[in-house]
Amino acid sequence: MESSLIQLVNFQLHGDARGKLSVAEVGGALPFAVRRIYWIYGTKPGVSRGFHAHKKLNQLCVCIAGSLRIRLFDGTNEDDVTLNEMNVGLKIPPRIWHEMHDLSPDCVLIVFAESEYDESDYIRDRKQFIRYVVG
Ligand code: T46
């Protein structure tokens, strides 16, 4: 499932008799040089996260265990994508409102980010976000 909002990447997969190995490298599946990596896990049942957009930050998310649904909103269109494959990443460009829902108890979401953490890059108010992107 892919729309202009949902940008998925397939990682290079090396499988052999021992199992599988996936690769994300700059110039390949990674669309930017990574300066920060964080991971989200141990989410309590029924808890959703995110509810913000970034002004400039590019990110790539990979669900390496369990599953979750990510809702993306560009100020006009909204779409949902379920991530449950270790070999697939979701690009979250700047100026996209994102919410993470339905995280399974075993969900581990690893996020590759283009820049160091900067709270001033966040827009955490949905109405402010719509004004920011739509004007
Ligand atoms: C995003 C989605 C997918 C830091 O101090 N450094 C960091 O690198 C990060 C990512 C977070 N924090 C602090 C800021 C907050 O006090 O950790 C706390 C939780 O962060 P937040 O409420 O923003 O977490 P989520 O899960 O709502 O959002 C996170 C990322 O922050 C965000 O950039 O795109 O995951």
Image (cartoon, grey):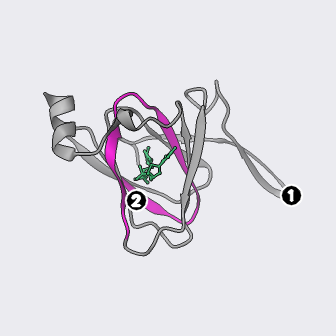
Residue receiving disc 2: 69
At which x and y percent is residue 73?
A: 27, 44
The amino acid sitting under disc 2 is: Arg
| Contact flag, marks 2 and 1 (Cβ < 8 Å) | no
Residue found farthest to the top: 27
Image spot of residue 91 (x, y percent): 47, 38
- Identify the secondary structure beneath mark 1: loop
The magenta stretch is: 47-71
Q: Position of residue 60 (x, y in %)?
A: 52, 40
Residue drawn at 52 percent across, 73 percent down: 105
Q: Quick check: is 41 in the magenta stretch? A: no
Q: Is mark 2 within 8 Å of ligand 1?
A: no
Quarter of the image where one finds residue 82: bottom left
Circle 1: residue type: Ala
Does 23 sit left or right of 117 as displayed? right
| Residue 97 sits in quarter | top left
Q: Is residue 66 magenta?
A: yes
Q: Which residue is mark 1?
A: 17
